[in-house]
Amino acid sequence: MNIRFGICGLGFAGSVLMAPAMKDHPDAVIAAACDPNEDVRTRFGAEYGIPVYATLAEMIQGTQLDAVYVASPHQFHSEQVVEASRHGLHVIVEKPLTLNLQDAERMIEAVDKAGVHLVVGTSRSHDPVIKTMRNIIRSGEVGRVAMVNCFNYTDFLYRPRRPEELDTGKGGGIIYNQLPHQIDCVKAITDKKVVAVRAMTGRLDPQRPTEGNCAALLTLEDGVCATVVYSGYDHFDSDEMHFWIAEGGRAKSAGHGNARKVLRELKDGSEAELRRARYGFGGPISKAMSQGNTGRKQPHFGVMLATCERADLRASADGVLVYGDQGVTEVPAQAGPGPYGQGDTIDELHDAITGKAPALRDARWGRDTVKACLAILESSRTGEQVKLQDI
């Protein structure tokens, strides 16, 4: 079965990350797209040979679809998921699911009522190495999982941003954009829910007035714990600790402070324009992504270590390193038929639609990740541990 997708939102996630993955996936077809920006949607339509529309409603009315990929800004996720569900369409929605629990519950109710499948993506928890770590643990060969350590230092906060991307209340900063990757990886690896959080966050640059660093202790079910450390201040780069492989799996070289330098050299008011030029459809990042998987190593999200009874697990360049009683062995990553990460997200929806396996990252999964993000903010504000049942 080929899933006929309509892409809703042609920003970085929709046009640069997901569209090439859909194009190269054996079970996906890009049937249409919509975006309010006429120039972007016109160029995208010409490139992919598909009809394009200004709104989701027009796309649903104008094209026969099986599913919608919602890649719009966070604040639009809820209404667009509800609209797609109401028309009987399955959904992949970009992380985070939404920004508050009221909208999350509304989305759960909508997909349940319509009987459609929803997958939250594209989180780095879809990457083959995370699936491989999860399966090694679930096999029982390394014993019970006890702890996961997540550690990532990037230039995230200094990549060109729109104003709302620096406003936490509108979903900006690392809490809603980067921590869900780590939280979802922890949940996928351990197969446990987060039950409590103790965290501290920081805003270290008054010119970027949103959270840029976080250290959190997550308590999960059955006594499992995880540490989540993230910094997006463009100083240290933790890819140095991951064989100088970038998040997307491509080789990189050291560039400490480069993102800050680019911003310093910008003229006032040109940051949003730079973002569109560099990260938008047809820009240099878009062209690099369109080259597919040739020469790529496995994607990752910083350094992750899982401690189990009989071994420690760590992502390698091509799989998972198992540090056991008899030394170190490497298990190749269990890759799907499509491009890494985004292709695995499509696999999850395809498996759910065809009845092969239920979606792991469904709407309730997404709601629980939003709860964890809200708990991190609350714990940082109060200095106390926050139980998710109290959120």
Image: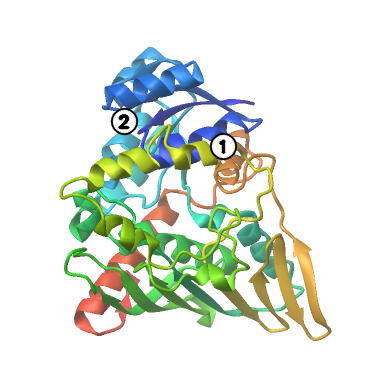
**Depicted 293 relative to depicted 171: above or below:** above
Of 298 and 8, nearer the camera is: 298
Q: Which mark is residue 21?
A: 1
Left-right relation of 23 to 163: right
Q: Would you call the spot at circle 1 few (<14 residues within 10 Å), some (14-19), or many (20 or more)? A: many
Give me the residue at 36% from left, 52% from top. Answer: 96
Left-right relation of 294 to 67: right
Residue at label 2?
A: 83
**Depicted 266 relative to depicted 277: above or below:** below
Mark 2 secondary-structure assignment: helix
Image quadrant in which you'd find residue 112: top left
Residue type, mark 2 in image? Glu
Q: Is residue 60 visible?
A: no
Mark 1 secondary-structure assignment: helix
Of 222 and 27, nearer the camera is: 27
Image quadrant in which you'd find residue 300: bottom right
Instruction: Give the mark, 1 or 2, whose residue is nearer the N terminus.
Output: 1
Report the residue that reaches farthest toward the front: 265
Residue 379 location (% of width, % of height): 27, 78
Residue type, mark 1 in image? Ala
Residue 132 location (% of width, % of height): 68, 61
